[in-house]
Image (spheres, coloured by chain):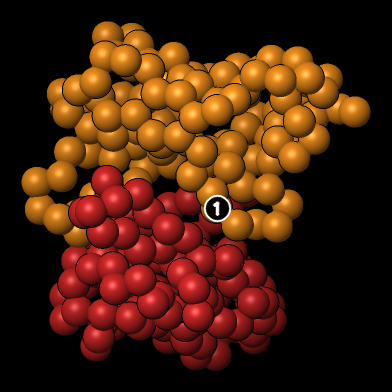
Chain colours: A red, B orange
Amino acid sequence: IAGITQAPTSQILAAGRRMTLRCTQDMRHNAMYWYRQDLGLGLRLIHYSNTAGTTGKGEVPDGYSVSRANTDDFPLTLASAVPSQTSVYFCASSVRQTGYEQYFGPGTRLTVT
Amino acid sequence: AQTVTQSQPEMSVQEAETVTLSCTYDTSESNYYLFWYKQPPSRQMILVIRQEAYKQQNATENRFSVNFQKAAKSFSLKISDSQLGDTAMYFCAFMNQISNFGNEKLTFGTGTRLTIIP
């Protein structure tokens, strides 16, 4: 692994189903983030984590939850998916030593039907 | 709350020409960071260039440079000698000065879709 990986690459999900998007980084970055990208809206922050064991809410947290059990993994869970959660989801990480540059994963395209 | 505005949803330019993408932002902070990210059709987000607000000198990275006007809250990206590989969505992003590491959230603009014409 080099950088950030996300799984799955894409997913079609029935409304009401539970779904966990996976994110793993191997750069030992302290901070991790989840964004959603929607046409005409850019990227918006869903949740973030300063370090393992801590999480915080971003701009659009409703309907999503996260956990940070260790440094490398930062899963995003949709407890009961709704069509408005159809989006492309990006995971990112950063560390102070690189000037706070955020490194992004390849994204997950999620379609809720 | 900070806002970032990109007023050009789409732009196109001939290969080898120079193009400038506009970005304005609103903040009451004096220290912050500004970024331009590129998103090609592969969907990968790639950092193009970064500017620290306390630095008066405009950042440059090879063919990419910025015009940072702090008083006007403007942060435009200039691409010189444009290449076909520059075709992508470009996002301007703002980050507050880091007071508590991990809270350095990025606020993105809505993006400009740039097409380089052969």
Q: Position of residue A33 (x, y in %)?
A: 35, 64
Give the x, y percent position of residue B24.
42, 21
At a point 48% along the width and 50% down the height, the residue shown is A43
At label 1, which amino acid type do we have? Met
Q: Is residue B17 above or below residue A34?
A: above
The spot of residue A103 in percent (x, y) is 42, 58
Density class for disc 1 (Cα within 10 Å; few <14, some 14-19, many ≥20) is many
Chain letter of disc 1? B
Left or right: B39 as drawn, with respect to B77: right
Residue in front for this viewpoint, A57 or B100: B100
Q: Position of residue A102 (x, y in %)?
A: 38, 54
- Asked if residue A99 lies left or right of residue B108, the reply is left
Q: Quadrant of residue A58?
A: bottom left
A85 sits left or right of B112 in the view: left
Q: Which residue is mark 1?
A: B45
Helix, strand, or loop for circle 1?
loop
